[in-house]
Image (cartoon, rainbow, N blue to C red):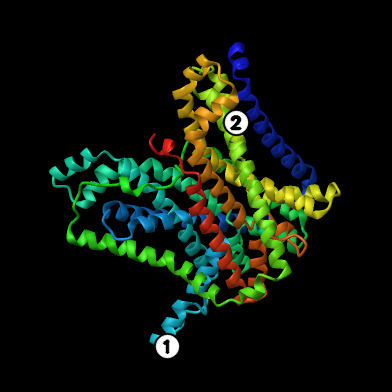
């Protein structure tokens, strides 16, 4: 055992150091929150706190249920309509929902469904009737959550449809199954486990949703814990209330993460060209599936189209020379770049360490290895248990204790939040690939006594190159669009593009907001589409 550890020290130490660093950060955060609490006030759980908790759970449950129903219907339709024109483009577009800044989505939905949006304008023109401000409140929160999460669910569920053995479809066809019987006996058993995994992920995302609730909530009656923490710190400066809410949220998210720890959601691009199901649908089923695809495509594309149309009317020559825009642009790009580099490095180190505890030929597969693997995995998934607003509150309290320029605290807080936010996805993508390279090349590398650098150059990087590009793009987009911690630290001296956009929306500078939203959307889509292409690897594709 000791000889194995010594032989693998270059693989164990970097990831072990990163894991300890992350766990140390979590300890400091909890310690800071614990020391700052007032026992008397924290113990008092008044009706306001119960109302916040009740609504947070309620909207997360409804959002998850609706997202799953819509996502399942969409994935089912796309899976059985492989010849649908533009299908590959639609699936690729739905994949982008994962990285679209939530504020951009909200802006697009307001342009289409708001009081002065396209739907109301069309209704007024055709029927002289306006639907009013129905978008604000619970309706708006649910619509935005379904927009983002149903496309995420459908993208993941397409993988499941693709993995069902074609022989099962042929057997069901020979038994004259209807489409409903096929779904119940062939597809549902395969979907059931993945649905649980997706449901737990969506519930966590909706439970900790911030930007959507902040803008579309409309009134305190529709506040969630996350927004209430922000208001307690930023607007009311009621640190005791913020701590109380933060501790409740920490307990809830930790319980949710522990409950969902056995579920896994696959993350990656969908290769639709490989999808073919040997089943010709009846005329009515086909029309129903095409209608589902058409309606959701309209629902997904119109807000993006609205951002482009509204944005093109903006005065870009003035926006691009605004000092606040220039400052926020370079701050966002700089933070996103550094965050992405750190995320890729941390994910590689953690994945490298994890595989020592998983591959039996490296270290003995015993309880000790399983415990260490769990610790390393937990350190990489800290963000799921510690949402960004709670992280921000911890940094805010630290900045009150230890004096330093606010720009320094803001930069550290944003970099930490961005890296932790991207790490769970980065690990889900890189760890399986690194396990495969370990299984394939370990014996050869150990027999040739290659150094760590030689192993990386000849064995690891060619297989990881594509995944690294995807992780970098994903992390960059996450960092670019986040409105979590910056909501606590944002000011005219330190601001990012999402915070600048939020300020423009709040001050009713609609035209300028449309221009900034279009710029943010263009950067996000360009990075998400083009960057992975630069990292394409024929070696990884062939394997």
* Rendered-image quadrant of the C terminus: top left
Within-10-Å neighbours for mark 2: few <14, some 14–19, many 20+: many
Percent position (x, y) of residue 516?
61, 68
**Label 2 SS:** helix
* Rendered-image quadrant of the N terminus: top right
Q: Which of the pair 52/296 is nearer the observer?
A: 296
Percent position (x, y) of residue 362?
52, 18
Residue drawn at the location 35% of the way across and 55% of the way down:
88
**Label 1 SS:** loop
Residue 312 shows in the view? yes
- Snapshot quadrant of residue 6: top right
Q: Please identify, in this view, whether the residue under mark 2 or under mark 1 is nearer the observer.
A: 2
Q: Which residue in the structure is indicated by mark 2? A: 376
Residue drawn at the location 44% of the way across and 69% of the way down:
302
Above or below, 197 against 73 in this view is: above
- Snapshot quadrant of residue 186: top left
Residue 113 shows in the view? no
Lateral position of residue 280 relative to residue 443, left or right: left
Q: How far is mark 2 from mark 1, CA to CA?
A: 61 Å
Q: Which residue in the structure is indicated by mark 1? A: 128
Percent position (x, y) of residue 142?
49, 62
Q: Which of the pair 430/457 is nearer the observer?
A: 457
Residue drawn at the location 54% of the way across and 17% of the way down:
363
């Amino acid at each position: 055992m000791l000889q194995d550890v010594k032989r693998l020290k270059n693989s164990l130490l970097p990831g072990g150091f990163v894991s300890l660093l992350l766990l140390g950060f979590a300890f400091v955060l909890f310690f800071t929150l614990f020391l700052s609490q007032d026992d008397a006030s924290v113990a008092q759980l008044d009706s306001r706190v119960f109302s916040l908790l009740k609504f947070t759970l309620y909207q997360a449950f409804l959002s998850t249920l609706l997202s799953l129903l819509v996502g399942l219907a969409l994935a089912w339709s796309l899976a059985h309509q492989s010849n649908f024109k533009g299908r590959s483009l639609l699936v690729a577009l739905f994949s982008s929902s994962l990285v679209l800044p939530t504020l951009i989505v909200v802006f697009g939905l307001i342009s289409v469904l708001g009081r002065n949006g396209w739907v109301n304008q069309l209704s007024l023109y055709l029927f002289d009737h306006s639907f009013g401000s129905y978008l604000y409140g619970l309706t708006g929160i649910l619509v935005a959550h379904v927009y983002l999460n149903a496309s995420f669910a459908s993208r993941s569920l397409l993988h499941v449809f693709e993995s069902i053995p074609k022989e099962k479809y042929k057997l069901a066809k020979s038994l004259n199954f209807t489409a409903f019987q096929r779904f119940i006996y062939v597809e549902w058993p395969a979907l059931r486990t993945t649905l649980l995994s997706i449901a737990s992920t969506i519930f966590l995302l909706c439970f900790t949703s911030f930007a959507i609730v902040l803008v579309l909530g409309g009134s305190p009656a529709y506040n969630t814990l996350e927004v209430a923490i922000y208001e307690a710190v930023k607007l009311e400066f009621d640190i005791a209330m913020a701590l109380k809410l933060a501790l409740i949220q920490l307990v809830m998210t930790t319980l949710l993460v522990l409950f969902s720890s056995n579920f896994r959601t696959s993350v990656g691009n969908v290769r639709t060209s490989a999808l073919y199901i040997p089943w010709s649908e009846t005329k009515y089923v086909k029309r129903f599936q095409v209608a589902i695809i058409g309606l959701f495509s309209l629902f997904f594309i119109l807000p993006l189209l609205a951002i482009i149309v509204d944005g093109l009317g903006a005065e870009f020559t003035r926006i691009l020379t605004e000092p606040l825009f220039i400052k926020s642009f370079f701050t966002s790009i700089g933070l996103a770049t550094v965050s992405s580099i750190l995320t890729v490095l941390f994910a590689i180190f953690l994945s490298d360490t994890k595989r020592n505890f998983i591959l039996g030929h490296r270290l003995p597969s015993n309880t000790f290895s399983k415990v260490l693997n769990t610790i390393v995995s937990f350190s990489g998934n800290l963000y799921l248990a510690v949402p960004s607003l709670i992280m921000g509150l911890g940094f805010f309290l630290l900045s009150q204790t230890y004096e330093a320029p606010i720009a320094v605290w803001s930069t550290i807080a944003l970099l930490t939040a961005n890296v932790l936010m991207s790490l769970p996805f980065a690990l889900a993508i890189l760890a399986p690939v690194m396990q495969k390279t370990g299984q394939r090349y370990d014996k050869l590398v150990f027999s040739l006594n290659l150094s760590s650098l030689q192993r990386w150059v000849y064995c690891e990087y060619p297989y990881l190159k594509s995944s690294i590009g995807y992780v970098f793009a994903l992390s960059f987009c996450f960092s670019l669009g986040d409105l979590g911690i910056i909501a606590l630290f944002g000011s005219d001296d330190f601001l990012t593009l999402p915070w600048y956009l939020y300020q423009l929306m709040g001050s009713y500078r609609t035209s300028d907001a449309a221009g900034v939203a279009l710029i943010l959307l263009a950067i996000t889509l360009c990075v998400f589409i083009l960057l992975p292409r630069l990292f394409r690897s024929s070696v990884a594709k062939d394997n």
